[in-house]
Image (tube, helix red, strand yellow):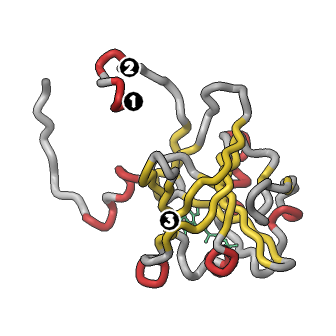
Amino acid sequence: MTLMKKADFPVANVRHFFEPGPVMLISSALANERDIMTLGWHTVLEFSPSLIGCMISVGNHSHRLIKESRECVINLPTSGLLDTVVAIGNCSGEEIDKFAEFSLTPQPASNVSAPMIAECHASFECRLFEDALVDSLNFFVFEVVKAHVAPSPKKPETVHYCGDGEFMLSGKHVSRRSLFRPEML
Ligand SMILES: Cc1cc2nc3c(=O)[nH]c(=O)nc-3n(C[C@H](O)[C@H](O)[C@H](O)COP(=O)(O)O)c2cc1C
């Protein structure tokens, strides 16, 4: 195996190597308001209960809707929605209704009041599970209480943000299933 020659790298930019989970669209609702934001900073925290951590900046309109309603839907867009994903992440729902602005279809969820986005491949209904880090770090821990996933395609082309306006599209899948202990799968 090759030993890699490494150079000094600015610590503020290491996010470019960590980020590439799929970019999500978070939909939320509170009273007669609804909103959508683009989210790249998220992480899986636990299988069961199914916990997902998300960094939702306090400057975003969605932050208030989600903090007060304690609910949201995390939607998985595919590459055909890339321009919309960027546009949603570059405007505020304080002034516009992003469902109408971007011709997206709100669908009622079964367990939360936030609408699902019909054009997305999957929609995960979430309730706020832990808010201990919301005020200090804008970090919300959600429990996925219901998951809706399109049966096909089996491996949708998702979009992954690398910073600086650049995205990676998901592509080649490789399996190492046989190397895993069954309980680690
Ligand atoms: C690719 C991409 C990824 C983003 N990831 C995040 C994120 O992880 N957390 C966050 O708070 N904002 C993120 N944003 C910015 C929000 O989506 C943006 O501020 C949005 O306008 C908020 O909308 P709102 O004010 O209607 O809630 C991202 C934007 C883009 C384009």
What residue type is disc 3 on?
Answer: Val
Q: Earlier in the sequence, mark 3 or mark 1?
A: 3
15 shown above or below 184: below
What residue type is disc 2 on?
Answer: Arg
Residue 178 lies, in percent from the top left, at: 34, 15
Label 3: which secondary element: strand
Residue 58 lies, in percent from the top left, at: 55, 81
Is there CB contact under 8 Å for labels 3 and 1?
Answer: no
The CA distance from mark 2 to mark 1 is 8 Å
| CB of mark 2 near ligand 1 (< 8 Å) | no
**Is residue 48 left or right of 74 when viewed as pictured?**
left
**Is residue 73 left or right of 176 when viewed as pictured?**
right
Residue that mark 1 sits on: 185
Q: Looking at the picture, tell me which residue is in the foreground, 122 or 46.
A: 46
Residue that mark 3 sits on: 141
Residue neighbourhood size for the residue with mark 3, other residues' Cα within 10 Å, grouped as few (<14), some (14–19), many (≥20): many
Q: Residue at x 53, y 75 (%)?
A: 57
Q: Residue furthest top?
A: 178
Q: Residue at x 49, y 24 (%)?
A: 172
Q: Earlier in the sequence, mark 3 or mark 2?
A: 3
The CA distance from mark 3 to mark 2 is 29 Å
Label 2: which secondary element: helix
Which quarter holds ligand 1?
Answer: bottom right
Q: Earlier in the sequence, mark 2 or mark 1?
A: 2
Residue that mark 2 sits on: 177
What residue type is disc 1 on?
Answer: Leu
Label 1: which secondary element: loop
Q: Residue at x 83, y 79 (%)?
A: 31
Residue 145 lies, in percent from the top left, at: 64, 53
